[in-house]
Image (cartoon, helix red, strand yellow):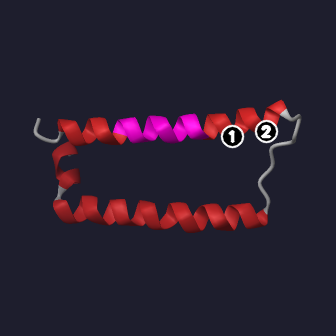
Amino acid sequence: MKDSAFIIFIIFGCVWVLMGIAAVIALLKADNQEIRIGKQGLIITMSIVLPLILALAYQAVKSGALSRFT
């Protein structure tokens, strides 16, 4: 129960990220532009997302947070 504030913070952050993605898609669609992701966009996205996922997974394993769910 003491982690509930942290969980609410993470959910709030995820909601803001999803709203940002939706805003970019809406902005592109308003100009009748085609939404496509090229090789360079994929490389940039992966270089941002992959370290974040690895850092969060490392901290979850290190702190034993996953042992609560088993």
Residue 69: x %, y % from top left: 21, 43
Residue 22 falls in image quadrant = top right
Q: Secondary structure at mark 1?
A: helix
* Quadrant position of residue 12: top left
Report, in whole angstroms, how far the alpha carbon at label 1 lies from the one at label 2: 6 Å
Using residue 10 as the reference point, say whether residue 38 is left or right of it: right
Q: What residue appears at the point 61 percent right and 40 percent down from the top-left corner?
A: 21
Which stretch did the figure color magenta? 11-20
Q: Amino acid at mark 2?
A: Leu
Above or below 16: residue 56:
below
Q: Is residue 18 magenta?
A: yes
Q: Quadrant of residue 33?
A: top right
Q: Which residue is mark 1?
A: 24
Residue at point 17%, 58% (across, down): 64
> In the picture provided, is 49 more to the left or to the right than 36?
left
Q: Which residue is mark 2?
A: 28
